[in-house]
Image (cartoon, rainbow, N blue to C red):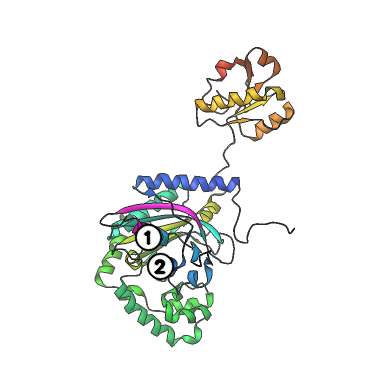
Amino acid sequence: MPKLQAVRGMNDILPEQAAIFSHIESTAKRIFAQYGYQQAIFPCVEKTELFEHSVGQATDIVEKEMYTFEDRNGESLTLRPEGTAGCVRAGIEHGLFYNQTQRLWYSGPMFRHERPQKGRYRQFYHIGVEAFGYAGPDIDAEMLFMSYRLFQALGLTNLTLEINTLGSSESREAYRKKLIGFFEQHANKLDEDSTRRLKTNPLRILDSKNPEMQSLIAGAPKLTDYLDKDSKAHYDTLKSYLRQAAIPFVEKPTLVRGLDYYCHTVYEWTTEHLGAQATVLAGGRFDGLVKRLGGQDTPACGFALGVERLSLLLENQVKLPDQADIYIVVQSDDLMEHALILAEKLRARNSRLKVLTNCGGGSMKSQFKKADKSGADVAIILGDEEFKHSEVTIKNLRDDTPQQRISFEEALKITEVRRGKL
């Protein structure tokens, strides 16, 4: 039998990294609650047509990257490559958007068949935030305030906010024509991807990472020169809100995002510490998406943050939590039954108390090694002599405090342990 390994680009999340993931999500959950966002949970698999109609057939995601298959009924299904489409589908299906506003967040794995590299995997984890029913730049600003607060709570101060506007569909269409005309005049300088995108999605040429394309892109027309009055007012107001909140930002005219449904505000939080995968959070407005997918016309905006990328930035800041507060050591296997019952009673007293029993046997010396490795502050020793007198021995593992014998009844009163202290 060949050696079994994980699928390329789909990684195991082991305890040390899982602890960072948990820290990111719990911090995000707390921050989102401050702003009135509620959690929702959506399927990992959707009908393929959902992404074709939302993300866009001319995007890299739909053309090259989706994991699509037929089920036993011959229906085309796709592992979700992003979260917004499924969130919108669920909102329409369950009537969440009809004459009401919604603030939602979700988390979970996404799937894209990309070339794996640091911070970019084929199964990756997103935390997504979406708001529906809010048309003004105030909700855009509030989302950026919220993301800024999240990064502060995580201790990340080395991120840059890049913003742009795609304007309304009308202003974007006028710009699209100018852009096509410009690139057609320089067709001999376009790479293969840009040539393919010229007729289908010319704005995506601006997002090219090909170094040989950058001088051409720098000379292309700027979308801000084609904004209508309302689009410009929306963008200017957003920038004013950010300045008032003292949140620094950089305007990036070539920022367009890779999904067809975006309009007006788009933004990315980036870092210089992850190489090519610089974006850790990205989002913007998608006012027409709900209507495109069959709902009523509903303004909307949102963002997604990459958990793996944030995890890489935090890997030296978050420690694996200790397995135990208390470790129960037994002198003989005959006492294991009593040790297990003692541990259950301690956990029942305080659901947050982490109590580890020494399952699997072993000498006292090996048990104390395991106790030390577990991070426990205190060991409860259940020995033959102690048991005869209905007692246990308490040993502090993190200092030289003399050990003491106490009764079972006193041991059951233990509800908290702090660095060697009961």
User: Mark number for residue 88?
Assistant: 1
Residue 142 place in picture, x, y as percent: 33, 54
Q: Is residue 81 visible?
A: yes
Q: Which residues are magenta?
A: 89-109
Task: State the quadrant of the N terminus.
Answer: bottom right
Is residue 224 within the magenta segment? no
In space, the residues marked 1 and 2 are separated at their CA atoms by: 10 Å
User: Mark number for residue 127?
Assistant: none
Task: Pick whichever of labels 1 and 2 is earlier in the sequence.
Answer: 2
| Front residue of 335 and 362 | 335
Circles 1 and 2 in contact, beta carbons < 8 Å: yes
Residue 37 place in picture, x, y as percent: 36, 49
Read off the residue under disc 2: 54
Residue 76 place in picture, x, y as percent: 49, 67
Q: Residue at point 55% right, 16% down? A: 410
Residue 179 place in picture, x, y as percent: 39, 80
Task: Give amino acid for label 2.
Answer: Ser
